[in-house]
Every structure is written in structure tokens, then in C-alpha cells.
Image (tube, helix red, strand yellow):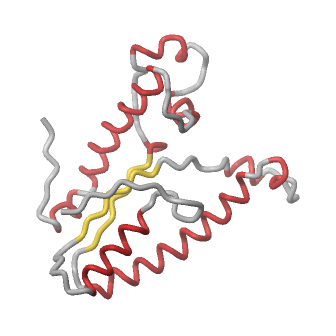
Amino acid sequence: QYWHLGDGGLLDNTGADTLYELVVRRVRGGSGLSHALVLVADAGAPVDAEGSRNTADLSIFSSNPAAVVSVAQARGNAFADLFWQQQRETLGIPFDTIVFRFDTAEIADWPASCTAVRDDGPTIREHLSAIETALDIGDCDADLIIAAAHDLVRRRLDEASDILARHGLAAVWP
């Protein structure tokens, strides 16, 4: 077992490329690694695609500089996905990735700590997407992130039961 917590950069926001490289090196180095399962928590916020489509000129890049990063990131991810898929196919071991995206969380009810926020109008998903990356967040934001994590882990691992089985694992809930 190998545990790694990392963060990515512009073209690998999740930090998964580092783990993929480690797996490839270990297998090719004869380490006896028999399988690899990479769990990725992707908290990257997508750029508003609809807002980007509604403009016919390039002013989107001056009014929304994050769109430049989004374009580069999408292109980089497409090439990286293709490259790593080819690597997986040549290794000869089960090598899978399960991705957890916070913006797909399904939270039905606001946590009790969010009474002031829930009356302001945003949906739970909108509020969750607007939480900034910071070491000091309020109780409502912390409770929403925890609720999202519980939902994502349960649903995603249930959906990925075939992947878990390939690695001799099963999701068990209390």
C-alpha cells in the first residue's frame, strides 16, 4: 500500500499524474506491483461554459482570465488522459482510477449551521461550488464539504463496485 496526498498544477489540477508515474516506474522496475487503484478528489471548479459560449468575440479572455486556464486545462487533460490510458494498457496489471468531483454531490438538505445562508437564495450546489479554497472556513461551508464528501464517497464507490472488485475490495457501509 502506498498513500500520497498531493495537489496538482495548471494541467494536472488533481495531482494524479505523480501517482500514475509512480505506478508505471514501479511496474517497469520489477517491483512486483500486482495492481493499482488511484482515488482522485477533484475539487477544481469548472469555468462557466454557458457564459463562455454566449460571447462571439475573444473579450471573454480579458473579462474572465480563468477561461484561458480552463482552455489549457481541458486540452492538457485530454492529452494526459490519452497518454495514461495507453500506459495502463501496456502495464499488464489492473490499473484503475476512481474520481470524486465535489460539484456532483447530491445533498438534499442544508446543514443546521447554514440557516443564515439557505435563506439567501443559492442552491446547495451553487453555494458548495462558491466555497473558496482557504484554511479558515465557516461552520456552514465545513459542514457542506463534509456532507458532500460523505455523499460522493458512498455514491461513487457504489457505482464503481466492479472496479473495486478487480482489486479485491468492496465498499461496506455501517
**Relative to residue 101, is residue 29 drawn left or right?**
left
In the image, residue 133 sits, relative to residue 47, either above or below, namely: above
Q: Quadrant of residue 165?
A: bottom left
State which quarter of the image contains the N terminus.
bottom left
Question: Observer-nearest residue: 150 or 108?
Answer: 150
Q: Residue 46, how many percent across, how many down?
A: 59, 50
Residue drawn at (60%, 65%), measured in percent from left and top?
74
In the image, residue 114 sits, relative to residue 105, either above or below, namely: above
Q: Quadrant of residue 18?
A: bottom left
**Relative to residue 142, is residue 133 drawn left or right?**
right
**Relative to residue 100, is residue 129 drawn left or right?**
right
Question: Observer-nearest residue: 21 or 140?
Answer: 21
Residue drawn at (82%, 52%), measured in percent from left and top?
60
Q: Residue 150, how many percent across, how many down?
A: 30, 36
**Relative to residue 45, is residue 35 drawn left or right?**
left
Q: Quadrant of residue 29?
A: bottom left
